[in-house]
Image (cartoon, helix red, strand yellow):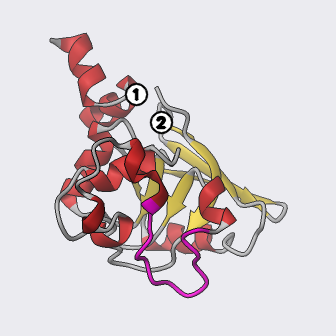
Amino acid sequence: MKTFGGPVLFLDRSDINTDEIIPAKYLTEITKQDLQPYILEDLKLEGFDPKGEKLKHARVVVSRANFGCGSSREHAPWVFEVNDITCVVAESFARIFRQNMFNCGMAAIELPKADLDQIFSHAADADAAMSIDIAAQTLTVSGGGKQQTFSFELSPFDKALVMAGGWVDYADTKY
């Protein structure tokens, strides 16, 4: 099972699409690793630098509603995976993106807007970090000397996929 948690990258916008996560011009790359330098290259968001230190160190992304909308492609979760980002927390996800995250053994955690607003209060904290306990279905955000814990729900199947490390590892143990 992957490790979940670490420094947080806050992307305070809804409707971040798969073309912004990994531009289509890179979909011809041969390996997942080849996608690594192009993560979020086309994302336009005030104060965001796709080549900046925050992204390089991030292990969790926190965003708003409808994350991963647009084209259905596995490349979007893959580019997070090869950049050691194993969890995205948002109000909602595009269905295919969300399932591709679970299939890759990564977490796509949905929280209500009110909880996300509280988490976004840590966006200015240079030390903002999150720990995620998949088994207990809780996440704890800390920074600026404050700490808050939130509960989330995953379906039993999605939780099993994440805990197994993804669809292939899950299938190896079940079939």
| Spot occupied by residue 58 in the image (x, y as percentages of width and height) | 61, 55
> In the image shown, does 34 or 52 lie closer to the viewer?
34
What is the secondary structure assignment of the residue under circle 1? helix
Of 161 and 52, the residue lying toward us: 52
Which secondary structure class fits the magenta region best?
loop
Label placed on residue 122: none
Image quarter for residue 4? top right
Q: Are marks 1 and 2 in contact (CB under 8 Å)?
A: yes
Q: Residue at x 24, y 57 (%)?
A: 27
Task: Residue lying at the far right in this picture: please name it.
Answer: 145
Q: How many marks?
A: 2
Q: 76 and 121: which one is in front? A: 76
> What residue does disc 1 label?
163
- Is 44 magenta? The answer is yes
Q: Can residue 136 be seen in this view?
A: yes
Q: Residues within 10 Å of mark 2 (few under 14, many from 20)?
A: some
Residue 21, horizontal then vertical, whole percent:
37, 65
**Sequence-first disc among 1 and 2:** 2
Q: Where is residue 123 in the image (x, y as percent from the top left)?
A: 66, 72
Q: Residue at x 44, y 61 (%)?
A: 39
Spatial CA distance of label 1 from label 2 is 7 Å
Boundaries of the magenta span = 38-51
Q: Residue at x 59, y 64 (%)?
A: 9
Nearest the eye: 87 or 119: 87
Q: Mark 2 points at which residue?
A: 134
Task: Say which quadrant the C terminus sits in.
Answer: top left
Q: Tell me the mark number nearer the camera, choosing from 1 and 2.
A: 1
Q: Is residue 52 magenta?
A: no
Furthest toward the bottom, the residue is 46
**Left or right of 132, for residue 73:** left
Q: Which image quadrant is residue 23 in?
A: bottom left
Q: What residue type is labelled 1?
A: Met
